[in-house]
Amino acid sequence: MIWLTWRQLRLSALVVLVGLAAYAVALAATRGQLADLYADSPSDFFQLLGLDDLKQGLFDFGTGIIYAVPAVVGVFWGAPMVAHHHVSARPARPSPTATPGEGC
């Protein structure tokens, strides 16, 4: 059963990892600039950030990722696993054609 679960998870995990890697590359390209911008003037960080659309977009996207990823992982990975566990834990129902006393 572990093998089947891993096969079902592989594609979605790969998509998430590729997306995360793409975001990490974009963030690494401007990481020093964002850190320097904040270090220079923490109180004016958001005003200065608004002057550059690329940095503003990366910052907003990163903030959205922080809020969205746990919910998306819970819905698309966690819920099916929990549902499968609860379905497989139930006893089998007798078939409609079974006669009493035959069992399941």
Image (cartoon, rainbow, N blue to C red):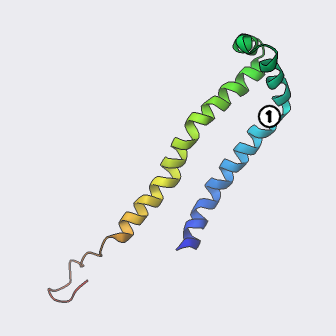
**Residue in the foreground of this view, choosing between 37 and 78:** 37
- Which residue is found at the position 64% from the left and 60% from the top? 10
Horizontal and vertical percent position of residue 98: 20, 84
**Residue in the foreground of this view, choosing between 23 and 43:** 43
Question: Visible in this render: residue 14?
Answer: yes
Task: Answer with left or right where residue 57 lies relative to residue 64.
Answer: right
- Which residue is found at the position 81% from the left and 39% from the top? 25
Q: Residues within 10 Å of mark 1 (few under 14, many from 20)?
A: some
Horizontal and vertical percent position of residue 83: 40, 59
- Which residue is found at the position 26% from the left and 83% from the top? 104
Q: Is residue 77 above or below residue 31?
A: below
Q: Could you tell me which secondary element the residue under label 1 belongs to?
A: helix
Q: Residue lying at the far left in this picture: please name it.
A: 100
- Which residue is found at the position 47% from the left and 60% from the top? 81
Horizontal and vertical percent position of residue 45: 73, 15
Q: Which residue is mark 1?
A: 26
Q: Is residue 34 above or below residue 28?
A: above
Location of residue 35 by image quarter: top right
Q: Is residue 88 above or below residue 94?
A: above
Task: Answer with left or right where residue 101 lies relative to residue 61.
Answer: left
Q: Residue lying at the far bottom in this picture: please name it.
A: 102
